[in-house]
Image (spheres, grey):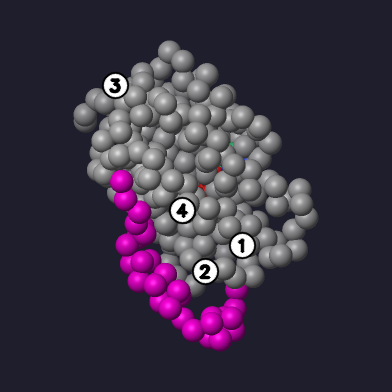
């Protein structure tokens, strides 16, 4: 185990991919700040990581659907911890009825969690991450490959994260700040629980291991698992008259 004397922040750490990332980061010796809405889940995870790996873990419970300034809350919780060098944003919230029938409040909540939170947190933590030549890791979705009548707001927010990725890369050189965007295929987590999926879902810990292994690599945008790149290309190339007849 290497001992990076720095802190990794995991937003959306209480379940699925975030939880798997926290576990993989603990094995690497990172101190961690774990963020999610449920304090009990975070405290239980923090205690088990501390017990198993002896790493410093702090947790912060925030409802990101309602929190106006999550970046400031995270920045103040980092005081006294080792310098922050890794920001992972595997946060996600989707709804079955995100099919052009949502009211304004529900649209606002989806945007708050999937777009406002990553933007606001990344903005607030940039000075600290640049100071350590750190890395920001963003999580898109294959749901945003091409607009359709389902996951309308969720996919819109995920598409906007591609723009954030480009903005950060345009603003910072690799030596100042690295930016990684993973466009994720289906994973077996709460987000897909009970859904009929057209293609197989991978285990989040397999995905997490790849992401943590690549933390010291340069900026990049890639599909994970990699074979989703081919699926996405086929979906994008499909003639409109065929695509618009597809179900779902
Ligand atoms: N699963 C898939 O098939 C799939 C596919 C493509 C992309 N993705 C993306 O992959 C990332 C990880 O997703 P996942 O499958 O691991 O999802 P997940 O198991 O549902 O975990 C989502 C995390 O986000 C947190 N979260 C949700 N709403 C929140 C809120 N209002 N305030 C604070 N925290 C909140 C949850 O914490 P609480 O439970 O405490 O609220 C949880 O820790 C997300 O960006 C997702 O969009 C997933």
Q: Nearer the viewer, mark 2 or mark 1?
A: 2
Q: Relative to 169, is 120 above or below?
A: above
Cα distance between the residues tagged 3 and 2: 41 Å
Residue corresponding to mark 1: 151
Reading the chain from its start, which is encountered first: label 3 or label 4?
Answer: 3
Q: Relative to 120, is 80 above or below?
A: above
* Residue 207 visible in this rendered orientation of the protein: yes
Residue corresponding to mark 4: 162
Q: Residues within 10 Å of mark 2 (few under 14, many from 20)?
A: few
Left/right placement of residue 165 relative to residue 39 reads left
Reading the chain from its start, which is encountered first: label 2 or label 1?
Answer: 2
Reading the chain from its start, which is encountered first: label 3 or label 1?
Answer: 3
Asked if residue 221 is among those painted magenta in the image, a careful observer would answer: yes
| Residue 132 image label | none
Point 52% across, 26% down: residue: 74
Q: Relative to 133, is 164 above or below?
A: below
Is the CB of the residue bearing disc 2 within 8 angstroms of ligand 1? no
In the foreground, 200 or 35: 35
In the foreground, 171 or 159: 171
Residue corresponding to mark 3: 5
**Where is residue 2 drawn, in percent x and y?**
21, 29
Asked if residue 28 is among those painted magenta in the image, a careful observer would answer: no
Where does the N terminus fall, quadrant-wise? top left
Point 59% across, 81% down: residue: 244
Reading the chain from its start, which is encountered first: label 4 or label 1?
Answer: 1
Does the residue at mark 4 contact the one at mark 1 (Cβ under 8 Å)?
Answer: no
Q: Relative to 173, is 71 above or below?
A: above
Where does the C terminus fall, quadrant-wise? bottom right
Cα distance between the residues tagged 3 and 4: 30 Å
Q: Nearer the viewer, mark 4 or mark 1?
A: 4
In the foreground, 205 or 154: 154
Q: Residues within 10 Å of mark 4 (few under 14, many from 20)?
A: some
């Amino acid at each position: 185990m290497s001992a990076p004397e720095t802190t990794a922040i995991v937003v959306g750490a209480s379940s699925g991919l975030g939880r798997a990332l926290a576990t993989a980061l603990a094995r690497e010796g990172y101190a961690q700040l774990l963020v999610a809405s449920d304090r009990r889940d975070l405290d239980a995870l923090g205690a088990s990581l501390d017990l198993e790996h002896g790493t410093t873990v702090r947790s912060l419970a925030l409802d990101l659907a309602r929190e106006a300034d999550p970046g400031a809350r995270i920045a103040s919780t980092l005081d006294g911890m080792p310098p922050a060098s890794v920001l992972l944003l595997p946060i996600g919230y989707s709804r079955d009825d995100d099919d052009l029938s949502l009211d304004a409040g529900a649209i606002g909540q989806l945007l708050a969690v999937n777009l406002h939170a990553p933007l606001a947190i990344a903005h607030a933590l940039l000075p600290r991450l640049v100071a350590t030549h750190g890395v920001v890791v963003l999580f898109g979705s294959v749901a945003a490959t091409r607009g359709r009548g389902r996951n309308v707001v969720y996919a819109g927010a995920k598409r906007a994260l591609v723009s954030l990725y480009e903005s950060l890369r345009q603003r910072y050189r690799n030596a100042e700040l690295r930016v990684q965007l993973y466009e994720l295929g289906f994973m077996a987590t709460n987000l897909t629980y009970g859904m009929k999926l057209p293609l197989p879902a991978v285990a989040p810990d397999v995905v997490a291991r790849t992401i943590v292994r690549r933390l010291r690599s340069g900026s990049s945008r890639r599909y994970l698992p990699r074979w989703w790149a081919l699926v996405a290309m086929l979906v994008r190339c499909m003639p409109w008259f065929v695509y618009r007849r597809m179900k779902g």
